[in-house]
Image (spheres, grey):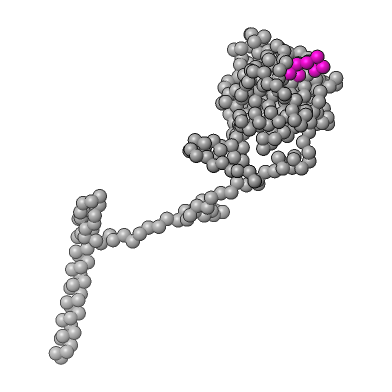
Amino acid sequence: MLRVVKPKTKQARRVLEKRAPKIKENVKKALLLHGTSTSAVVKGVLSDLHHIKKDGGNAVHWTRKNENIRPFEPAGAAPLEFFSKKTDCSLVVFGSHSKKRPNNIVFGRFYDNHVYDFMELGVERYKSVKDHGGARKFSPQVGSKPCFAFIGEAFESDEKCRQFKEMMLDFFRGEEVDRINLAGLDRVFVCVATATKQVLFRHCAIRLMKSGTKVPQIVLVDVGPSLDMVFRRNQTPGEELRKEAMRTVSKAPQKKIKNVSSDMMDGKVGRIYMPKQEVRCRASLCHGRETRLFTGWRDRAEENEGLKKRASRSGCSSSRRGKER
């Protein structure tokens, strides 16, 4: 039986609550690392991906060499699962270089700190962000939401292209929001599937130029990185694991609020409790001091009491006269 270690400090308790499963998940973080042998192209790709993903602390980049990591082997993926749990990252990008698979990039996803799927790509052509020197002034704003454009029928029919599409959406989606400002849409990720089993990845900035009409002219400026990649190996999840990972809750349980109800006509209706108010009281305590009623209230109260006394006296006198008669 496994021993359950309870947190001893409030900080540790907050960290565990943040990592606990939620109905509305946190932004997925990405871990970028490389193996024992690498190349300048692989290092540049990892650095540029970290530059795009790092806003809000959503990316962790390790530059040291990591041994005994083989994603497509059961024992070789164990270090990645350990690093995922340690850094609380559900996405991983692993770079390596060898004679058999040069400039190799592996995208992976985790579910419950265990391997969900992997996608291996080979970089054939690469142009970094620094090489797009003239496009730095068109760099996207921090925290902006990106657009996605997947061009090609293969993204709907081919299995590897569909898996690549899902990974790109998970990797660059960011925080899920209900509303968005159209002025904040200033970049787009363009992925093109060619007939030669290649994927062209481009990161472009959206610029609105004057067109002489009310509708501006949209121009895409390539800001990098630009990648031409080819598919290699892939690993897909099982049917049971996929169903468990895709399970969602229809509605979040709402805490019942007392004395609040909803009506079809009036909408939200509330009920409040009002204690009995002693308006005719002569004096009341307010903030620790004795206060008297207003003059108008006091005069009316005295008039009412005088009328009652007169009526009672007249009633007593009439009853006595009746007895004497």
Q: Which of these two is toward me, 254 or 29?
A: 29
Please state the horizontal and vertical placement of residue 166, each as a whole percent of the image. Answer: 73, 31
Q: Is residue 147 above or below residue 177?
A: above
Q: Quadrant of the C terminus?
A: bottom left
Q: Give the magenta part as a residue range.
A: 96-104
Q: Quadrant of residue 119?
A: top right
Please check the rendered image and state whether residue 253 is part of the magenta-colored stretch, yes or no: no
- The answer to which quarter of the image holds residue 323 is bottom left
Closest to the observer: 204 or 262?
204
**Farthest bottom residue?**
325
Foreground pick, 287 / 101: 101
Q: Is residue 167 visible?
A: no
Horizontal placement of 230 versus 68: left or right?
right
Report the residue at 56% width, 26% height from top: 56
> Which residue is outermost to the left?
324
Residue lying at the far right in this picture: please name it.
Answer: 196
Relative height, residue 257 to residue 69 (above, below): below
Camera-nearest residue between 265 and 275: 275
Q: Residue at x 69, y 28 (%)?
A: 79
In the displayed structure image, the side of residue 89 where residue 167 appears, left or right: right
- Tally the marks: 0
Q: Position of residue 316 (x, y in %)?
A: 17, 81
Q: Decide whether the magenta segment is chiefly helix, strand or loop.
A: loop
x 22%, y 66%: residue? 304
Q: Could you say where residue 54 lies in the image, as x and y percent from the top left?
A: 60, 23
* Residue 112 appears in the picture as rendered: yes
x and y percentages locating residue 108 in the rendered image: 72, 28
Question: Is 2 located above or below residue 145 in the figure?
Answer: below
